[in-house]
Amino acid sequence: MKRNNIKIKSGVITGLMLAGLVLFLLAGRAFSKNERFAFNFGLQTVYDDNILDYSDADLDLLDDPSVPDNRYSIKSTDDFIFVPELEVIYKSQLAGHSLHTGLVGRYYYYSENDIKRYFRIEGYFKRYFNRRTYIQGTIGYLPDYYYRNSYSSTVGYQEAKFDKIFLEGKLSIKLNNYFTTNFSYLYADKDFIPLFDERDIKEHEFQGQAVYYPAKYWKSWFLYSFITAFGAGANSIQYRRDTSFDANLLTFGSRLYLKGLKKKSFELAGQVSYKIVYFQTSKATVEDRYRLGREDSHWYLTLMAKHAINSKFNVGVNFKKTNKTVNLPAQELIGFLESSSNSVYLILDYSL
């Protein structure tokens, strides 16, 4: 997917997803029974104290008049973000088992930083073979996402934006009443604007997950992912930068299903993740001093509480903390790469 060769616009992608959904619906009506539509509406209100995950060194330079023009384009490092979400699901039966097809759209509205506003759209199908096994396929598109202002040797600091398309396949098998295993593969293609073509990257992620149900009110999960990504500059003398990396991700989480006020359902959940990233570049250029021999360690902590108001309406709060530390031979650059952020989400979910 290249911006300067194949212009993939959001309207085209949206149209293809809608057309695909219509075809699923028409095909489903020919072979299925008990078909019906379901609509889910969600709204999250988020406060994030570091929306671009700037390092402390970068934050110190935000108000420094001596920094190069256009190094920073955001109006504030923190922001309130409103995320409305609409999901349309078509539920049917095919060959005696459930088939769900759906379309999900989300818009991320940053109240202060309009440069960060964007939308994301996904289409999917979920096909059950029996009560214990299903496969799921997803295609998603995220256009004109603002990464941050990046440096170009020809024009200095400019806005770096990219389009991203991803495809995911998943197999889920419930082994017994206590264990479920999930296996998935994700392919993502991130395509930057022509000025930053060397940052283009293709990712492959392989994931395995085990879910344990020790009791009806409790489940826990463990997840492992291996990610390998190939940058456009990996084998090209045209580019002075290589963004290729390998990564390992470990996640452990747990969720409790309890009774809250007026015996309505009440959920508590927590999850901790650790990701280590190994950059693969061998280029000893000025630009790649930021990656040569570099390893990143990411910690993520998420806490969530959600309460049902009635059978269709839920409210909740979600807290997320992230922290990134860097090991790099060019130690004078570490201060510009390490970062941390905290986010608080207010969740409103409504099913029509």
Image (spheres, grey):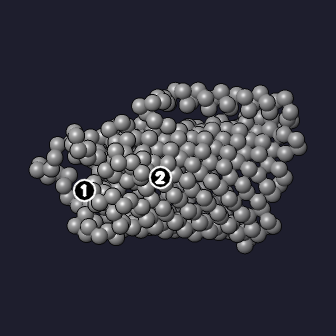
**Residue placed furthest toward the left:** 66
Mark 1: few/some/many CA within 10 Å (<14, 14-19, 20+): few
Residue topped by disc 1: 286
Q: Image height check: is 29 above or below 252?
A: above
Q: Image height check: is 71 above or below 224?
A: above
Q: Is residue 113 left or right of residue 32?
A: left
Which element is circle 2 on? strand
Quadrant where the image shows the C terminus? top right
Task: Return the x and y of residue 205 as percentages of the image width and height.
Answer: 57, 56
In which image quadrant can residue 257 be found? bottom right
Q: Nearer the viewer, residue 151 or 37?
A: 151
Q: Image height check: is 332 above or below 118?
A: below
In which image quadrant can residue 174 be found? bottom right
Q: Is residue 164 left or right of residue 351?
A: left
Residue at image point 59% right, 66% down: 224
**Residue placed furthest toward the bottom:** 214
Which element is circle 1 on? loop
Residue topped by disc 2: 230
Mark 2: few/some/many CA within 10 Å (<14, 14-19, 20+): many
Residue at image point 74% right, 50% down: 135
Q: Image height check: is 42 above or below 55?
A: above
Task: Return the x and y of residue 154 as percentages of the image width and height.
Answer: 22, 40
Residue at image point 45% right, 48% down: 201
Q: Nearer the viewer, residue 233 or 247?
A: 233
**Residue placed furthest toward the front:** 237
Which of disc 1 and disc 2 is earlier in sequence? 2
